[in-house]
Image: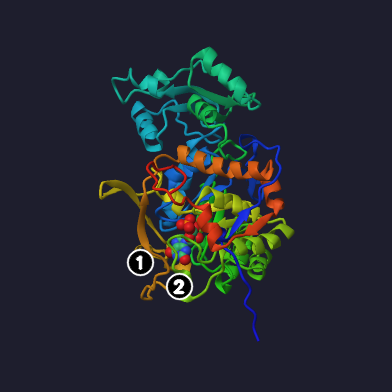
Amino acid sequence: MFTITEKYSYDDVLLVPAASEVLPDEAQTRVRLVRDLYINIPIISAAMDTVTEEQMAIAMALRGGVGVIHRNLSPKDQAKQVVHVKRYLNWVIHAPFTITADATMKDVKRTMKKHDVRGLPVVDDAGKLLGIITGRDLRFVNNDEQKVSTFMTKDVITVPVEITPERAYEMFGKHRIEKLPVVDKDGTLLGLITFKDLQKREENPDAAVDSDGRLLVGAAISPSDWQVRVPMLLEAKCDFVVFDTAHGAAKSVLEALRALREAYPQMPVIAGNVATAPTAKLLIDAGADAIKVGVGPGSICTTRVVSGVGYPQFSAVVECAEVAQAHDVPCIADGGIKYSGDIAKAIGAGASCVMLGNMLAGLKEAPGDEIIFEGRIFKQYRGMGSMGAIASGSGDRYQMRKEEKPVPEGVEGRVPYKGEAVNYLHVLVSGLKKGMGYTGCKDLESLRNYKQFVKITQGGLVESHVHNVSVTKESPNYS
Ligand code: XMP
């Protein structure tokens, strides 16, 4: 005798409105991502090859979210992209590129070009600061064989390590300079602050950053490649890794998770995907610092129809989040989000944040070119289990062996072009905040503990959507 229980997806439920003193724009959206890493909006861009590479990861983190760089890239290229994200925004650059006084101006040009920087502190063999050479100095060079010592500025304005961003800003203005070397009391170079970095910080006050002011970024790994990827990602200063698998409760995933935990305890690990309380507990027991929930809800997924297996996403999040919360482990709702209101529902179900593929794949910052089709602009979006993505390497996400003939669990398609992430993320987060306003939840913790939902009928769903009208002007948050 078996029982079949009813489970729900986002479309089956609605948050119940309540008396509220919370104005939407006052609602707080800061949340713990994993261990002691926090993000300022609860949105992660999916580890998919049509969603997150370095450009998307930078855009996400600048607006307060975070991106997970996909793993259909070689370990070297993935780590390189992480380095680019980590170098995009700095407070103090702790190991700036330097040059010696007896190097030539040709060396300076080569070093600047190679590392894409516009200034180099000049140091002696012991690391003492002797001067600085910047892009401006290059303009007066007529012979590349001349020594750095001829062109460098020797009278360098420096700052001690205790400097604050406010004070650094003042120094840049007062001395009309663009680089401030940080030195100890003996004049040894400890770091570098650039005006460009401070300006970017000012323009992006909500950026999700690490303790050194660098953008947060994650990278996807698998049970078969983590031993190669993780050391390179650690070296690249990657903030966390994501065991990116379709079946997080598979023995191979749990074993790899335990082994990774043991080998690199310093690296925060998000692991998934699961959809039930017992499997969530397996991941937590194996050492996951956060769990990712979703078996088959994704817009490009065919797992449920191909295999007959899945779990409606709203219930999956409710059940997994309960276990996760009991162990103080964040729970990420991955896949199936179609509208900003679903983000509010996912967090109301107990998730700390959501992972989005479809909703972000049409953004300018997503990998790939815009495609014009029947006069409209689109971008490609495909499942990591689609034929195309498997051919690029992601078959092991679905426990396929390399030599096996691929059987896809996802499709390839296109989504409408949506412009820049900055505007679209604002629309998404505003929708979430409206949900918090309607329910009187001042922050995400309150929304997680709110727990007031109603189940709706098919009639309720029809009523919820636009009806009995021909839409004449497209809305940025409804289609
Ligand atoms: P959305 O709904 O945001 O979902 O497009 C993104 C999530 O879907 C998962 N994913 C897949 N699942 N077959 C699947 O069954 C696939 O080909 C596939 N590709 C991605 C993944 O968890 C992602 O974050």
Q: Position of residue 275 (x, y in %)?
A: 59, 66
Residue name at image x 50 percent, y 57 percent: 462
Query: Percent from the top left, x then y, of residue 282?
Result: 65, 69
Viewer-side residue, 51 vs 117? 51
Labels 1 & 2 near each other (Cβ < 8 A): no
Q: Quadrant of the N terminus?
A: bottom right
Label 1 sits on a secondary structure element that is helix
Q: Is mark 1 within 8 Å of ligand 1?
A: no
Which disc is residue 387 wearing? 1
Up-down relation of residue 267 to residue 442 (above or below): below
Residue lying farthest to the right in this orientation: 326
Please say whether residue 39 is visible from this viewpoint. Answer: yes
Viewer-nearest of discs 1 and 2? 2
Residue 404, labelled with which disc? Answer: none
Q: Quadrant of residue 191?
A: top right
Q: Report helix, strand or loop for mark 2.
A: helix
Around disc 1, counting alpha carbons within 10 Å, would you say few (fewer than 14), some (14 to 19), or many (20 or more)? some
Compared with residue 312, is residue 368 higher up or lower down, i.e. above or below?
Answer: above
- 42 sits to left or right of 441: left
Amino acid marked by disc 2: Val
The mark that comes first in sequence, 1 or 2, is 2
**Circle 1: residue type:** Met
Res 287 seen here: no
Using a 10 Å C-alpha cutoff, classify the residue at mark 2 as few (fewer than 14 neighbours), some (14 to 19) or many (20 or more).
few
Residue sticking out furthest to the front = 468
Disc 1/disc 2 C-alpha distance (Å): 16 Å
Is residue 6 positioned above or below 237 on the image?
below
In the rendering, at what x and y percent does residue 190 appear? Answer: 58, 31
Q: Nearer the viewer, residue 450 or 172?
A: 450
Q: Residue furthest top?
A: 174
Q: Residue reaching furthest left?
A: 374
Q: Which residue is mark 2?
A: 305
